[in-house]
Image (spheres, helix red, strand yellow):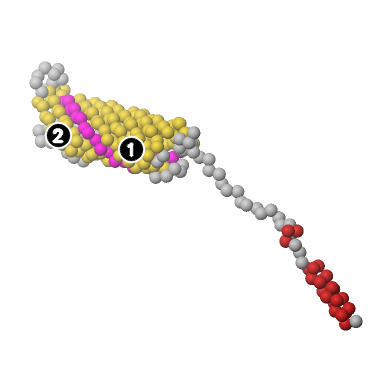
Amino acid sequence: MRYLLLVVLLFFGTVQLSAQVTNIDTVHYPDPIIPKSNTYNFNTDFWYTIAVRAYAYEQFPQLLNQSSGQQQYHTSYLNGLLFKINDNQISYRLQAAHFRNDIAFDNECEGCLPQVSGKLRNTALKVGVEKSVNYSRVQPYFGGDLGFMFQQLNTRGFGNATVFAEDTKNALLFSPFVGAKVYVVPRVAVGIEANFNIAYTYQKVNNYSDDTFTGAPDQVRRYRWEYFFAPVAAITLQYSFGLINQ
């Protein structure tokens, strides 16, 4: 009888324990919710860029007998082109710009005309390298250009129609620069940069007694190092094409 009672108790206990056990594979959990990640589809990786120099505010090499650091700042609009070949974060660039305008300035030297006016022409050709800091929509960059500049000034003194001067200058340039560009849409960007120019120049000045060029001119020739600054070397409108990842 004792053994029968023990068997009954063991059977009853086993039934109670099995009723409390739940198989893991029968439990249903709700599907996990994973937050969606933001997708960034703004592609700025293009092989080529062409740009128009829309605005510039810059100095040029010294004119006549100006002392170093006395160069005027000149404003210009829509007078230059820039072409770049892009290789990841490095761009190889070629640019040309031409300035032409009537100017007036003080000519500080003993025995010189104190004030002169005339037409200034300046043409610059440069090649260089530009490195972007990142690939984002706003891209700071820096680099340097090597180039050649040709400048000519034809001028006469204020109130003096019998004095005429022709100032011609050639310059070899090294122009380190910094800038930034902002992509408005993936192919179109607006850029702004500033540069500092180190130039080795050859200047020839012909001073005529009148504007008939019949007499032999008084000539001045000089070589020298010059430094001039462009706080706004260029504000450019840029268009890129040719996807790198195609």
Instruction: Report the predominant secondary structure element of the magenta stretch.
Output: strand
Residue at the (69%, 53%) spot, across then down: 31
Q: Is residue 168 visible?
A: yes
Give the CA distance from mark 1 to mark 2. Answer: 28 Å
x, y percentage for residue 128? 31, 36
- Tally of numbered discs: 2
Asked whether 68 or 125 is in front, the reply is 125
Q: Is residue 106 visible?
A: no
| Image quarter hosting the N terminus | bottom right
Asked whether 107 or 58 is in front, the reply is 58
Residue at the (46%, 38%) spot, across then down: 44
Under mark 2, the amino acid is: Tyr
Left or right: where does residue 19 sit relative to residue 124? right
Give, as a single range, the part of the protein colored magenta. 165-183
In the image as oriented, which residue stretches furthest toward the right?
1
Let me know if residue 114 is in the magenta part: no
Residue at the (83%, 70%) spot, across then down: 15
Q: What residue is pinned by disc 1?
A: 129
Q: Which mark is residue 223?
A: 2
SS label for mark 1: strand
Q: Residues within 10 Å of mark 1 (few under 14, many from 20)?
A: some
x, y percentage for residue 118? 22, 26
Placement of 119 over or under 200, stated as above or below:
above
x, y percentage for residue 190? 42, 36
Residue 8 figure quarter: bottom right
Residue at the (46%, 43%) spot, across then down: 136
Left or right: where does residue 100 sit relative to residue 243? left
Left or right: where does residue 63 sit relative to residue 130? left
Under mark 1, the amino acid is: Val
Q: Residues within 10 Å of mark 2 (few under 14, many from 20)?
A: few
Left or right: where does residue 81 sit relative to residue 219? right
Residue 164 figure quarter: top left
